[in-house]
Amino acid sequence: MGKTIHKLINETELFAGLADGDERAFETIYRHYSKRLFPYVLKLLKVSELAEELIQDIFVQLWVNRQVFADVEYPASYLFSIANRQSLKYLKKVASDARILKRITDLTEPSSNVTEEQILLRESAAAIDLAVAQLPQQRRIIWELSRNEGLSHEQIADRLGISKNTVKNQMVHALKHVRHFLDKRSGLLTGLVIIALTNNKL
C-alpha cells in the first residue's frame, strides 16, 4: 500500500501507444515515471524547483520525439538515460553561465524550510566569487568575459587584443585555481558544483 509500482503492467503497450501519438498513454506514462524520475534528478541537481522544471522539459521532448519509442526495447531505462543526460548537460552549463548559477542561488534563498544542501550551494557560489577575485587581473577579466558574458575564446581574444591560445591557457589556469580553491574548502563544495566544474568544456 502506498508504494510506487516499479513497472507498469501494460508498459509495452503504453509506450507503443505513445509512439503512435496516444495522449492517454502519454499521460499514464507521465504520471508514473515523473514520480520515479524526480528523486533521481533531484539527487543530481540538488534543488527541487530545478528538478521539477527539468522533468517537465524531459516529458515535453518525450512527446515531441515520441516516435523513437517504437524501436526502444527497454523504455524505462531509456527514460532514465535521458534524465541523466539532460541533468549533466544542465550541470555543465552552471560553470559556464553565471546567470544560471545566480538563478540557482536565487531559488535557494533563506526560507522556513532551508536545507543543508541549499545552504552549501549558496556558500559554494560565494566561494567561487572569492576564488575569481584572487585571480590576476587579465586572467580574471578573461574568466568573467567567458563565464559572465558568454564570449568565445576568439571573441575574448579580439576584445583584449591577445591570441586565442593565450585566452585558452589563461582559462585553463583560472579553472585550476578555482577548483583548487574549492577543494581546500570541500565542506562548501556541493556535488553540483564539483560535477559542473569537472565537466565544463573549456
Image (spheres, grey):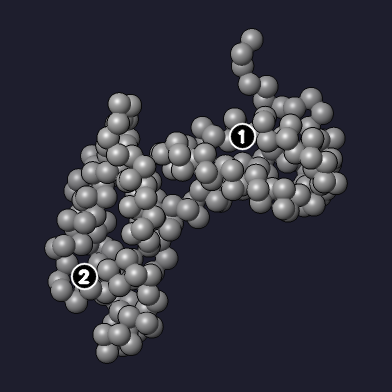
Foreground residue among 108 and 167: 108
Q: Is residue 70 left or right of residue 47?
A: right
Could you tell me if the residues under marks 1 and 2 are in contact, i.e. CB atoms within 8 Å? no
Few, some or many residues within 10 Å of mark 2 (<14, 14–19, 20+): some
As drawn, the label of residue 34 is 1
Q: Position of residue 97 (x, y in %)?
A: 37, 61
Q: Amino acid at mark 1?
A: Ser
Rendered location of residue 47, percent (x, y): 41, 39
For mark 2, what is the residue? 140
Instruction: Please state if 30 lies on the left or on the right of 159 as rendered.
Output: right
Give the left or right position of residue 59, taking residue 21 as reference: left
Q: Secondary structure at mark 1?
A: helix
Percent position of residue 76, x then y = 69, 38
Q: What residue type is disc 2 on? A: Arg
- Precedes in sequence: disc 1 or disc 2: 1
Residue at 68% x, 35% y: name it: 30
Instruction: Identify the residue shown where x is 22% and y is 50%.
Output: 126
At horizontal 27% and vertical 43% (from top left) the residue drawn is 122
